[in-house]
Image: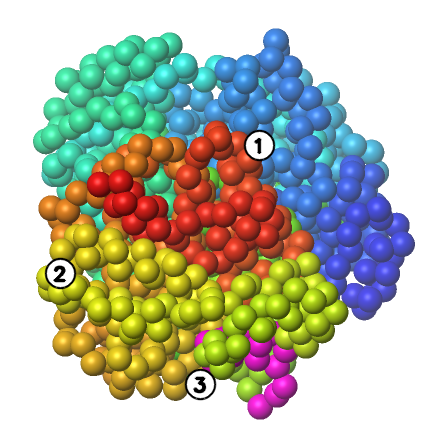
Amino acid sequence: MPATDLTRALAQALHGDVESDATARALTTMDASNYRRVPQAVVAPRDTADVAETLRICREHATPVVPRGGGTSIAGQATGTGVVLDFTRHMRRILDLDPASRTAVVQPGVVLDDLRAAAAPYGLTFGPDPSTHSRCTLGGMIGNNSCGSHSVAWGTTADNLRSLRVVRYGGGDTLHLGRGLPDAPPGLHEFAADHLALLRTGFPELPRRISGYALDALLPEHGPDTARALCGSEGTLAVVTEATVRLVATPGARALAVLGYADEAAAAEAAPGLLPYGPLTVEGMAADLVREPAGLPRGAAWLFVETGGDTPAEAHAHATRILRAADALDSTVVSDPAAMRTLWRIREDAAGTATRMPDGTEAWPGWEDCAVPPARLGPYLRDFRALLAEHGLNGTPYGHFGDGCIHVRIDFDLLTDDGVARFRRFSEDQADLVVAHGGSLSGEHGDGQARAELLPRMYGDEMVGLFTRFKDLWDPDGGLNPGILARPARLDENLRFAVLPRRPVDVAFGYPHDGGDFSAAVRRCVGVAKCRTQKAGPDVMCPSFRATGEEAHSTRGRARLLHEMLAGEVITDGWRSTEVRDALDLCLSCKGCRTDCPVGVDMATYKAEFLHHHYKGRLRPAAHYAMGGLPRWLRLAAPFAGLLNALARVGPLAALSKRLGGIDPHRTLPVLARRTFRSWARARRAPSAGPDVVLWPDTFTDHLSPEVGRAAVRVLEAAGRTPVLPRRGVCCGLTHVSTGRLDAARAVMRRTLDRLDHAPGTPVVVLEPSCAATLRTDLPELLPDDPRAARLAASVRTLAQYLEEYAPDWTPPRLDRRIAGQTHCHQHAVLGDAAERRLREKAGLTGELSGGCCGLAGNFGFEKGHWDVSVACAEDQLLPSVRAAEPGTELLADGFSCRTQLDQLAGRRARHLAEVLAEGLDGR
């Protein structure tokens, strides 16, 4: 029956959302695996009744259904060809939390971190904690029987389930599953009784046996427990609508023993010996996952062994005992929470980091999480490395060494027929290797499409036949997630790369980290969805998703739409796509994903690229002309600044100018400087204080906040340097880049390079972080063949970076005051703020600046239609932190956008760090 009839029937029957447009379908073609399946529609149910109705209608229409949580599954089980049930929109409530019984009742769309946050005031937590804890859902964890780093202490999701409420394909009554078979499909009791011998002998004994169906949970000596039997069934048996889970007591304090070893096999062999000491984690990784200095002890592989205690001293003592027992090359105990978070971030980001080998080549899941008995892990890893070499492949193993579970991304070539054939051969040999070591093909993420075809190698044909019969008892019509687990699709079918162009796409940017290939850049997104984190923190990514909660406004969602645009199947009009345009419209171009995304997706660049092609030869939105050409308009307006400021205060004239310029009516037009920074600099007689430094007169400093430039001159001269400005006007091209006018941007950049007259290698101090970031990254990526671009990019410094590097003995004025405000998102993403932190500390400026994005983001917050999202982004972190600041707190914001947002939304004036330091010089 046509999809239109199906969606019409669903829309008439449900209270929730029913979507079959290209955007909704494109957003759910993939999870975090190598696989891609195109659905007919996406349903976001509001309650159990909606779920039951969806399953009833889909059965009537012979349409398959796949339940989906955070979409972070790594084996392909969260993709489907029929209807995708998205539980993350509405069914995400914690229905009950009982500290006395240590249980919680949750809907399947509850994000794990939300449950943990709700339990934390009672000293409780949910034990399983995969690295995607900030965005994975309880329903997805139940579907995959997820584990996480603390499973050595608290077990798998199945170990922490009390009961489930589920609906079967076709709708009907809700089943209540749990210990003692309170509800069960007809014939399940008889099925278990008829096969007791095989159920007792057919499953390997190891802590991370996730593969296949958990039929041994039906044994009478184990309960039986239908909830446990369904856990890990990957949405193939029934759809969970409610779960009662067990909570565990969380230690009052924690410490981290970090142990260094000669190689990963040595670390693996040491791991089982630490388990008797009762650690909370025994995690392992090798040096090829550590891309930056991290303060790790000496070694080429490390174990992260977390310990707990009622007090910090008790946790530290526990960790020290483990150090003494570990016989490591080198070791340390970390107790500082911030230092612990830094180290754990390396481990948690590995699912993304490992998708790029140290030489930059791509690596993929497929053999992401097999497990062996912990005592066999060392020999297994040696054999695994040998198997990789035999097939000419490379990988970076890491994972849950205490449980014998290894994660790895391997540099499979999944773009060519020969590469896919090698992928199959390796997968078959790898399955045999895991079985030879007494292991499980999956130790955490499920079999999905990646491994289910190989289950006969692990279990034998008789047990796999029981899996099929078990599936049929629950789902006789075969409508739930077909092709997964029972009667599986082949592991080399439905690969998501097959639909992409085989030749590089003609693009404007150079994409130096992706071989100049836009498709490869888009492929960076593997779907781990760190961008879907809604909890505020030091990271920036992804402000628009946190504001709207919609997948289309996440970095992953936009990358998925670009992938489908290149594929041309769901989104069919290429660069002219309105679906991609609309999703990118709310991208703030904050560049946060460039740093915060574990694989370095750079959506700001992709957005500029898309807009460049989308509007080529066509009329653009008014804001692209008004704000894209801002440097030119400000130069023309400079002689008439006083008059224009007066006219801007006339309501009707201001409204007209905003309407013509595509500016949101809520916005106030910035005040033009009566005297530009450049004119002030030309007029003054500058003392020769020392070696020259080029001070970049960016558009914002020159025409809108010249006081920042004047302050920077004072600071540099006080530090014994002579700031000089380029003799002719220069521009980084930022506003052209952010509006996708890349031909104009390149022309401006070339003209700037022609006009620069300083000696090569002279440092260039740029006061506006967005301009500094443009010069550092966009300039060489848009002009990759011009060596002058690379030289200028390498010369760029922020004021703090310059002072630290070239005037290290200079002592700033002692200001001794508290600070609040905003770290510019481009500063965070491209330039880093370590030097600024150290300079503030030397000046006695204490406190933290907000993470996230201010929400103005250059032209974004001024554009018509962006007001609500812009304000929501500011309310995420910046405005609450400013409201909470004590009287007399200094508000700092080096970015013009951040200062403008604070002025217009909070009525507070923030200052550039240069201004605050210059003011302090007066008191010396």
Mark toward the viewer: 3 or 2: 2
Q: Nearer the viewer, mark 2 or mark 1?
A: 2
Residue at coordinates 15% horizontally, 34% vertically from top-left?
297
Q: Residue at x 15, y 28 (%)?
A: 331
**For the residues carrying marks 1 and 3, which lies nearer the camera in this image?**
3
Q: Residue at x 41, y 76 (%)?
A: 733
Instruction: Read off the residue under disc 2.
Output: 689
Q: Is residue 12 left or right of residue 548?
A: right
Magenta-highlighted residues: 617-634
Above or below 410: residue 50: above
Task: Name the kind of residue labelled 3 in the image.
Answer: Asp
In-image side of 26 versus 317 (left or right):
right
The residues tagged by marks 3 and 2 sit, at their Cα atoms, a distance apart of: 40 Å
- Which numbered disc flags the more N-terminal residue, 1 or 3? 1
Tag of residue 703: none
| Residue 213 at x, y percent in the picture | 55, 37
Along the line of sight, the residue nearer the viewer: 837 or 313: 837
Dot 1 alpha-carbon crowd within 10 angstroms: few under 14, some 14 to 19, many 20 or more: some
Q: Name the mark on residue 743.
A: 3
Q: Are marks 3 and 2 in contact (CB under 8 Å)?
A: no
Mark 3 or mark 2: name the one nearer the start of the chain: 2
